[in-house]
Image (cartoon, grey):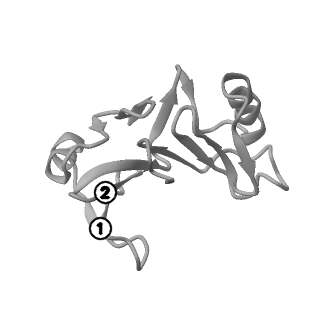
Amino acid sequence: MRLIIRPYDGVGPVDFGMPTKEVRAAVGTVFTSFKKTPVAELPTDAFDSLGIHVYYKQPGVCEAVEMASPAEPIFQDEPLFNRPFAELRRWFKKIDPQIEVDESGLTSYKFGIALYAPSSADEPQLPVEGVLVFAKGYYD
């Protein structure tokens, strides 16, 4: 499923701030809910057939969407999967010189996007494995 990223607004049919029930209706496929971490206030919805996890904050509204294969995240007409991390890092650096790069990928606070590439420090030619798109304040 092609999912167009709208910085600080949403991804595909999901808008940040959308209530859980509306997210589930908008995505429109089977899901499971689980606690991603022991301290998570609200469960995460996993739409595994689409490669999408949706995170919620109080009062039960979407605050982030994480994507893995088979999802197809698209940002500024650029696909973010099936491309080497090093290539995407160079591209993000051009559009956001303030990106933060670490051993597991990069984060652009300008656009509210994080790329997960766990082997990026040693093997930057490997592709990105996950994309997180988040609402303003997610990391506060």
Distance from disc 1 to disc 2, alpha carbons, whole Å, reads: 7 Å
Where residue 46 sits, quadrant-wise, is bottom left
Q: Which residue is mark 1?
A: 43
Question: Disc 1 or 2, which lies upstream in sequence?
Answer: 1
Q: Residue 124: percent from the left, percent from the top? A: 80, 46
Residue type, mark 1 in image = Pro
Residue at 58 percent across and 45 percent down: it is 114
Direction from residue 49 to residue 26 in the image, left or right: left
Q: Which residue is mark 2?
A: 56
Residue type, mark 2 in image = Tyr
**Labels 1 and 2 touching (C-beta < 8 A):** yes
Most distant residue in the front direction: 140
Q: Residue 64: percent from the left, percent from the top? A: 40, 49
Q: Which mark is residue 109?
A: none
Mark 2 falls on what kind of element? strand
Q: Is residue 50 visible?
A: no
Direction from residue 48 to residue 84 in the image, left or right: right
